Image (cartoon, grey):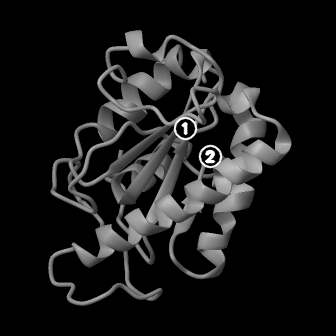
C-alpha cells in the first residue's frame, strides 16, 4: 500500500469513538465546529470519509497529522479491536499528540492497560451520558476553550514558529509517528476511527 501523503493546512483535532457513541460524538462536534469557523483547527472524524475512499489510508493520514486527539471512552471504545490495535497504538507512539480522553459512558477505564495511566476528563465524576442537556452544553463550551488553548500552544511550539500563533498557521505534520510534535504534553486521548463494524 502506498504510504499516506501528508497534506496539512491547519492543526487537526482527531476524534476517536465507538459507533455506539455516535450521538455523543455529534454533539461534541457541534461545539467544536466554532474552531473551524475561526480557522483555529480542522475537526476530523470518520464521518468525513467519502464513498470510494480508502478509509484506512484516510484515518492514518489524520492520525499522523493530529495535534489533539479526543477519545470518547466507553465500554464499546475499550472493546474495539480497531481502536486499540490501530488508532491508540499509533497515537501513543507519537509524542506530539495531546491526548484528551472524555468519559462518554460509565466504564472500568482505569483497568484498561492503555488508558489507566491517563487522566480521563469527567464532569464532577459523571460521564457525558449522565449529564443533563444544559450540563453537557456547559461542559462542551469549556472543553472548546481548553482545546483551543492547547492547539495554540502546540502551533507556537512548532520548530521555526515565533510569536503568537495565527489562524493561518499550519499544523504539524509528522512523516513518522515518533517525531516530536505539536504538544510536549501527554494526556489520555480518544481517537476517531474508520467505518468499521468492530467499533
Q: Quadrant of residue 50?
A: bottom right
**Contact between labelled residues 2 and 1, with CB atoms less than 8 Å apart:** yes
Q: Which residue is mark 1?
A: 193
Alpha-carbon neighbours of circle 2 within 10 Å: few (<14), some, or many (≥20)?
many
Quadrant, the C terminus: top right
What residue sits 59% from the left and 32% below the top? 124
Residue 51 visible in the shown view: no
Mark closer to the chain start, 1 or 2:
2
Label 1 Cα crowd, 10 Å radius (few <14 / some 14-19 / many 20+): many
Question: Residue, x 74% and y 26% (percent of image)?
Answer: 130
Single out the residue that lies furthest toward the front.
Answer: 124
- In which image quadrant can residue 25 be found? top right
Spot occupied by residue 111 in the image (x, y as percentages of width and height)? 39, 9
Rounded to the nearest angstrom, the CA distance separating label 1 from label 2 is 6 Å
Is 74 above or below relative to 190? above
Q: Secondary structure at mark 2?
A: helix
Give percent across and percent down for residue 170: 37, 79
* Quarter of image, res 110: top left
- Vertical order, 67 against 195 (above or below): below
From the image, tell me which residue sits under label 2.
46
Identified at 60% across, 82% down, the residue is 38
Q: Residue at image x 35%, y 66%? A: 6
Up/down of 189 relative to 162, above or below: above
Q: Is residue 13 left or right of residue 20?
A: left
Amino acid at each position: 500500500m502506498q504510504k499516506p501523503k501528508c497534506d496539512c493546512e491547519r492543526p487537526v483535532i482527531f476524534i476517536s469513538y465507538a459507533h455506539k457513541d455516535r450521538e455523543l460524538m455529534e454533539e461534541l462536534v457541534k461545539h467544536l465546529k466554532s474552531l473551524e469557523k475561526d480557522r483555529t483547527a480542522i475537526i476530523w472524524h470518520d464521518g468525513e470519509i467519502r464513498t470510494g475512499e480508502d478509509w484506512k489510508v484516510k484515518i492514518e493520514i489524520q492520525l499522523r497529522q493530529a495535534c489533539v486527539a479526543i477519545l470518547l471512552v466507553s465500554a464499546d471504545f475499550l472493546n474495539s479491536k480497531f481502536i486499540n490495535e490501530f488508532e491508540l497504538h499509533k497515537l501513543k507512539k507519537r509524542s506530539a499528540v495531546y491526548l484528551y480522553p472524555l468519559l462518554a459512558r460509565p466504564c472500568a477505564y482505569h483497568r484498561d492497560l492503555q488508558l489507566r495511566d491517563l487522566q480521563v476528563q469527567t464532569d464532577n465524576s459523571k460521564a457525558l451520558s449522565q449529564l443533563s442537556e444544559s450540563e453537557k452544553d456547559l461542559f462542551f463550551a469549556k472543553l472548546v476553550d481548553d482545546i483551543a488553548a492547547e492547539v495554540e500552544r502546540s502551533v507556537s511550539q512548532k520548530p521555526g514558529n515565533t510569536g503568537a500563533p495565527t489562524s493561518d498557521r499550519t499544523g504539524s505534520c509528522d512523516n513518522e509517528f515518533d517525531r516530536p510534535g505539536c504538544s510536549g504534553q501527554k494526556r489520555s486521548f480518544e481517537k476517531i476511527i474508520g467505518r468499521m463494524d468492530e467499533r
